[in-house]
Amino acid sequence: MYLVTSEQMQLFDQRTISTLCVPGIVLMEHAGRAVAERAAARRPKRVVVLCGKGNNGGDGWVAARWLHHMGVAVEVLTVVHPDELGGDARLAAEMALCAGVPQRSLTQLEPTMGCEPADATERSLRLPQADVYIDALLGTGSNRPVAPDSRIGRVIAALHQVDGWVMGVDVPSGVDASTGCVDGLAVRADETVTFAAQKLGTAVSPGCEYAGRVHVADIGIRIEPGEVAGPLAVWVTETAVRDWLPARGPLSHKGTYGRVAVAIGRMQGAAVLAGLGAARGGAGLVALTGPDQPTLAVPPEFVVRAGAPDLAASVSDCQALVLGPGLGDAVDLWQPVLAKFEGPVVVDADGLRLLRLRPPVEGYPAEPRWVLTPHPKECARLLGWTTADVQGRRLAAATTLARQTGAVVLLKGYHSIVAHPDGRIAVNPTGDASLATAGTGDVLAGLIGGLLAQGLPPFAAAAAGAWIHGRAGELAGEAMGPASVMASDVIDNISRAIHLHFDR
């Protein structure tokens, strides 16, 4: 399932018009009807459509006309007078008006100059009462912040106060369709009807938090990845994860599924959680290794190589290494090991401190060996940003860190982002508040390490690990409620997630 930027969508749109000879007004008709059908499915008695001056507004005019034909009481509120519209949007408005759709300018709802009440709440714009509000103010081509004191800003502020269902058209107004950034006011939609493919900005945070449930409508635009420069972003899907996971044949043995080493340091519980994540994810053997012997109980299935005089030798027969969970100050001992270890490495938590010892990578191999799994605060520290900067521009943070380090980056959080330094992006849809507890990040690092040991390339291992980990969290939350889930519960549900979705 592709996730496209505004520029990519514009190219696909223009190619469909020019190559397939589909007039723009036909695409607008399909788009508006799709919006009307989604709105009508809610059986509203009254609908208000808010239309801007571009093609997004044209979609809104078409939706209003179709709702009128369906017998729904509908009214269009416009930012500009229909006579000021151009192109297909003007034609769509003319058809709606000829069909008898009522229209008012939003200026008619604003308080009269010189007669404004003293109460600021009374001066604010108030929208007519309706069951459904359709936001067709700004489209995918708009990427400028919406100022609170602008006319569009006042309309959005008014939408925040309504009781009805709010539907975004293509992308909620104020959300950057390409990046998900929200630098000013933005519509908080309950549902967004988008066309041809979901926009990347409504898949990543913070944009996804404004889009609500996203419905993709096929309006006849052809999506051809080869027509754009660079790869298209994708959702991580169950089908993709199934294709990545290795088949487990009857003649296989533990060596078939690889050995993963987990570095153990001061907070030994974190390393054990990572090892359990690797084991539940299918690794054939888990080895705990470090300079000191464990002082807590270790699962009997694990191999303990702690206390080895040569750390590099203790991991030399392993196919993957997990470095970071609970390491503390021992992380510095692993710098020379990384110089010798040739397999893929998951770098998490304390291990990310090693990146400050490495200069930015000028070039990178076709398939990086490192997978970095920072949470937003760790990502901010690595980039020299603030945590708020990372959370406000998660897509830019993940892709920038991937380019600077030459590693695959999994930026953890709601709709985790997996970024490859060559520009590939995958967004993970699984996971919920059940994962908001200590130790779940350690489990994720180990799970990815276990998948690497089984031969998955780093990008696939990070994406598959995020999907399985998120699904395991959901299953744990369904069983006991999100507030009660612990990291060990997520570990227990990794096997359940794999069994439910991939053991066929």
Image (spheres, helix red, strand yellow):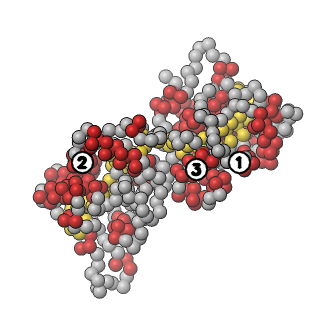
Could you tell me how far apart the alpha carbons at marks 3 and 1 are, in whole angstroms?
15 Å
| Classed neighbour count for the residue bearing mark 3: other residues with Cα under 10 Å, few (<14), some (14–19), many (≥20) | some
- Residue under numbered circle 2: 24
- Asked which secondary structure carries label 2, the reply is helix
- Left or right? Give the position of 123 relative to 487: left
- Residue under numbered circle 3: 400
Could you tell me how far apart the alpha carbons at marks 1 and 2 are, in whole angstroms?
50 Å
Q: Position of residue 432 (x, y in %)?
A: 52, 46
Q: Is residue 72 visible?
A: no
Q: Amino acid at mark 3?
A: Thr
- Residue under numbered circle 1: 359
Viewer-nearest residue: 330 or 41: 330
- Asked which secondary structure carries label 3, the reply is helix
Viewer-nearest residue: 438 or 318: 318
The image shows residue 459, relative to residue 210, as above or below, that is above
The image shows residue 300, relative to residue 372, as above or below, that is above
Q: Position of residue 8 (x, y in %)?
A: 40, 46
User: In terms of image quadrants, where is residue 459?
Assistant: top right
Q: Earlier in the sequence, mark 1 or mark 2?
A: 2
